[in-house]
Image: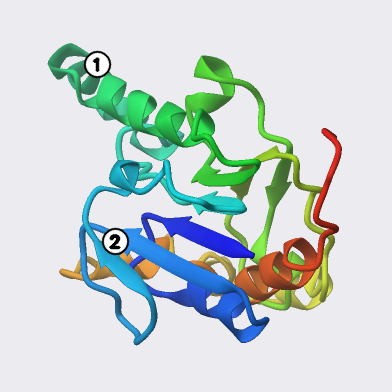
Amino acid sequence: MNVLVACEYSGTVRDAFARQGHKAVSCDLLPSDTDGHHVIGDIRDLLDGEWDMLIAFPPCTHLAVSGARWFPEKRADGRQQEGIDFFMDMVNAPIDRIAIENPIGIMSSHYRKPNQIIQPWMFGHLEQKSTCLWLKNLPTLESTDNVLEAMMDLPKNKRERLHYLPPSEDRWKLRSKTFQGIADAMADQWGNLPSQLSLL
């Protein structure tokens, strides 16, 4: 398949699909952290290409409920609407299969509720971070390695490691990187679908 990974600089999801033999291309305004097919630029310039699947990670800065106290000023100056419009550009991309990832935020009411909310501990990571998936012509992800019980034995600052990261220049990058177990599940479960998939 030709897989386009939107707003990904880490290469985690791109490389997971590439290892399965797919032609996977990532795109972001930043250069990729790893070698691989990567386009630096606006993802919207690529959406009309011949893609079989789009996996998108639109910026959540103006959409996530964790930043709700800044919503009034972001609504007033247009930043939140820009975030909503960009998210919807991913939704409306002319691509048969689409997955859009974002934390819990306003898109559940501005668009629709997500098809699924996943956690890193469902895929072998001893951490919790609620992640929403909006899906088009893709099945929900199945847990591959549920480590909830082991994770709950950890102190809160360990199982919510990303939330407790100290301020730094790259804190936002560390918080936004896809967990490897989730990327592998996407490639394993979505990369082997039949060529034609009826609407779910």
In this view of the protein, which residue sits in the foreground, 159 or 175?
175
In this view of the protein, which residue sits in the foreground, 144 or 169?
144
Crowding at dot 2, Cα within 10 Å, few <14 / some 14-19 / many 20+, comes out as few
The label shown at residue 200 is none
In what quadrant of the picture does the N terminus appear? bottom right
Most distant residue in the front direction:
50
> Residue 16: horizontal and vertical position, in percent?
59, 78
Crowding at dot 1, Cα within 10 Å, few <14 / some 14-19 / many 20+, comes out as few
> Residue 81: horizontal and vertical position, in percent?
29, 20
**Is residue 57 positioned above or below 26 on the image?**
above
Q: Where is mark 1, residue-wise?
A: 75
Q: Is residue 186 visible?
A: yes
For badge 1, the amino acid type reads: Arg
Which secondary structure, mark 2?
helix
Q: Kindly report the distance in space between the C-alpha atoms of the residues bearing marks 2 and 1.
A: 22 Å
The residue under the point 30% across, 27% down is 69
Q: Is residue 85 left or right of residue 94?
A: left
Determine which quarter of the picture holds residue 144: bottom right
Q: Where is mark 2, residue-wise?
A: 172
Q: Is residue 180 visible?
A: no
For badge 2, the amino acid type reads: Trp
> Residue 199: horizontal and vertical position, in percent?
82, 33
Which secondary structure, mark 1?
helix
**Is residue 151 positioned above or below 7 on the image?**
below
Most distant residue in the top direction:
76
The residue under the point 81% across, 48% down is 139
The residue under the point 35% across, 48% down is 46
In what quadrant of the picture does the C terminus appear? top right
